[in-house]
Each structure stands twice: as structure tokens, then as C-alpha cells.
Image (cartoon, rainbow, N blue to C red):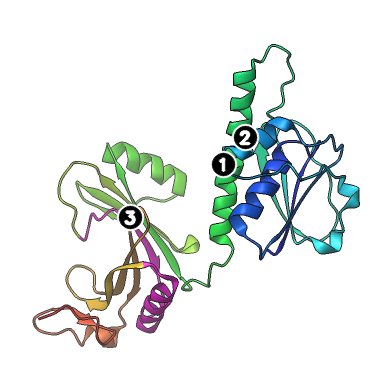
């Protein structure tokens, strides 16, 4: 993603603001262009609302998509929500962000409302480009064999009925507080948990989970997480109480817990210590005595 082209019909407002925002957010390592199928000149209000963010697009010009070298583009982002976007040929990666055109179709729009439309379009584009920037250099994550999720529900019976219909299977088991659905064909382990205000424990923990192939994969996921800069809530360890697992706990930027786990082999289960205390899998990660 080193050469990005933003497209809309007039190359007047949305794609011009996107060009300026992308250049500011993504930096000089990325080449950014914009164009349109019916270039109409840069809208002065686009220049004005971008200046509110300290970004000067007054020197940008409106261009035809026909003037863009297809060989110099590897990502095309179309921004039309209310018109047919320009067609750009070639085997490039494509994203579509439907942003409403801030220029009025009606003549009764006040100056203040018009500026607000441009600010809204600007901010929607800015948020999308910030996500694009966050995805620009994501390293390979840990390979997974299974996905596990737990969600909170108000009425267990009603929710179990709904998810039995949605997933096409009865839950594998359930208590008065939770039910567990298994779909091996989807590598899915899905738990619904009653939101009753009681303390969560290993059977009712609200979290996301990713199943790994074995103990070594969990340890590898730990090293990937450290390299990536993820928050490690609990380092990799083998636990015996509840469901015996090799597990690593991460925490996402909003505080949601992520369990990366692998089930124990029969041989590993036979190694369970008498005190059932966890065994830490990476030297130096044990808590202080």
C-alpha cells in the first residue's frame, strides 16, 4: 500500500479531502492521488474545512481519472455514495467508502449547514484513513485452529433458542448461567452467558478466544504478541483447574480479554502436578514468589 488513489465523480470535495488527509496521516512514505470522472475543480469549502485541521489543500488540483497512470497505483478507494463512481482498470486492491456528497442538490441549504456537511464528510473520511493507517504494517498473527467467543444475554432460554436456530445445533451443554454451542465444521466454540451481575469465573468469563494447535503454538503466540506490542495480561502457562489448557491471556485496547489456548494431550494431562498449580511455559514470566 504505497500508492493510493481516491476517486469520486467531481474530484472536488470528498476525494480532495481524502487526498489531503491521507497525505497528512500516512506520511511521506505513501504516494497519494485523487481524481474523478467529471473533474470540477477543488471546492473552496473543502479547502476551508481542511484548514480547520491545519491541512492546506489549496494547491491541489482536480484531475481526470483518465490522466492517472494505472501502473502507478496499488490501492483504489472510491468515495461515491449517491452516484456511480469512476471505473479504474487494472489488478489493484479496491476499497469502497460510501461518503455522502456534501455539495447541495437543493438551493435552500444555509451556509452554516453547508459547512457542517463538509465537516461531516471530512471527519468520516479521516476516521477511515486512520483505520487504514493502523492496518498498513500489521505483522502476521498467530495461526489459529478454532475461534471461541462468549457474549452476555439477558434471558438464557430465549437466547439459547435463538442461537440454536441460528447455528443449526443444540448447545453441547448448559447450566442455569450459560450454554455452550460447538460447531466443529466452523471451528466455532460459542458461549452465551447470563448477564446477572454475578462474579465471572472460568466457566462464565466474557471474552474472545483463539484455539491453537499445541503448547508450542501458544508460546509462539506470546512472542508474536510481545513483538507486536500487545498487552499481555497473563503469560503462557499450563493450567489444570477447570478445563486443563495451555493458555495465554491478552487484553485488547478497550480492555477485552483474549484467551489464546491449546488443549492438552493425554501425555500432558498425565503430568498434572499434585497441587494443580499452573506451570509457566516461558522462563522469566513467573510471578514473583
- Count residues near mark 2 (Cα–Cα under 10 Å), then give few for <14, some for 14-19, many for 20+: many
* Residue nearest the viewer, comparing 78 with 197: 78
Q: Residue visible at 64% across and 15% down? A: 110
Give the left or right position of residue 166, taking residue 83 as reference.
Answer: left
- Count residues near mark 1 (Cα–Cα under 10 Å), then give few for <14, some for 14-19, many for 20+: few
Structural distance between the alpha carbons of marks 2 and 3:
36 Å
Q: Residue visible at 41% across and 81% down? A: 220
**Residue 76 pos. (x, y %):** 74, 53
* Residue nearest the viewer, comparing 68 with 215: 68
Task: Name the secondary structure under disc 3.
Answer: loop
Identify the residue under disc 3.
256
* Residue nearest the viewer, comparing 110 with 289: 110
**Residue 187 pos. (x, y %):** 46, 64
Q: Residue visible at 87% across and 37% down? A: 38
Identify the residue under disc 2.
49
**Residue 237 pos. (x, y %):** 25, 78
Question: If you read the primary sequence from the N terminus, does the residue marked by circle 2 or circle 3 appear first?
Answer: 2
Discs 1, 2 touching: Cβ within 8 Å: yes
The total of numbered circles placed on residues is: 3
Can you tell which quarter of the image residue 197 is in? top left
Q: What stretch is highlighted in magenta?
A: 202-230
Question: If you read the primary sequence from the N terminus, does the residue marked by circle 3 or circle 1 appear first?
Answer: 1
- Count residues near mark 3 (Cα–Cα under 10 Å), then give few for <14, some for 14-19, many for 20+: few
* Residue nearest the viewer, comparing 60 with 22: 60
Q: Residue visible at 62% across and 60% down? A: 27
Amino acid at each position: 500500500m504505497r500508492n493510493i488513489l481516491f476517486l469520486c465523480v467531481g474530484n472536488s470535495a470528498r476525494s480532495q479531502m481524502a487526498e489531503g488527509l491521507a497525505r497528512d496521516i500516512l506520511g511521506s512514505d505513501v504516494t497519494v492521488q485523487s481524481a474523478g470522472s467529471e473533474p470540477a475543480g477543488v471546492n473552496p469549502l473543502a479547502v476551508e474545512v481542511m484548514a480547520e485541521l491545519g491541512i492546506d489543500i489549496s494547491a491541489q488540483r482536480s484531475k481526470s481519472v483518465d490522466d492517472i497512470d494505472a501502473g502507478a497505483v496499488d490501492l483504489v478507494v472510491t468515495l461515491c455514495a449517491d452516484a456511480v463512481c469512476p471505473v479504474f482498470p487494472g489488478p489493484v486492491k479496491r476499497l469502497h467508502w460510501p461518503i455522502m456528497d456534501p455539495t447541495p442538490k437543493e438551493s435552500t441549504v444555509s451556509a452554516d449547514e453547508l459547512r457542517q456537511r463538509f465537516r461531516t464528510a471530512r471527519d468520516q473520511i479521516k476516521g477511515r484513513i486512520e483505520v487504514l493507517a493502523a492496518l498498513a504494517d500489521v505483522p502476521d498473527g498467530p495461526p489459529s485452529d478454532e475461534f471461541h467467543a462468549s457474549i452476555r444475554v439477558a434471558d438464557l432460554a430465549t437466547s439459547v433458542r435463538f442461537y440454536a436456530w441460528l447455528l443449526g445445533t443444540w448447545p453441547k451443554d448448559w447450566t442455569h448461567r450459560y450454554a455452550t454451542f460447538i460447531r466443529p465444521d466452523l471451528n466455532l466454540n460459542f458461549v452465551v452467558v447470563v448477564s446477572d451481575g454475578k462474579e465471572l469465573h472460568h466457566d462464565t468469563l466474557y471474552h474472545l478466544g483463539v484455539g491453537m494447535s499445541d503448547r508450542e503454538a501458544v508460546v509462539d503466540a506470546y512472542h508474536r504478541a510481545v513483538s507486536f506490542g500487545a498487552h499481555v495480561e497473563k503469560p503462557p502457562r499450563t493450567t489444570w483447574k477447570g478445563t486443563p489448557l495451555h493458555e495465554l491471556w491478552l487484553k485488547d485496547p478497550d480492555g477485552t480479554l483474549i484467551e489464546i489456548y491449546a488443549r492438552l494431550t493425554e501425555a500432558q494431562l498425565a503430568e498434572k502436578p499434585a497441587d494443580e498449580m499452573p506451570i509457566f511455559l516461558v522462563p522469566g514470566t513467573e510471578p514473583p514468589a
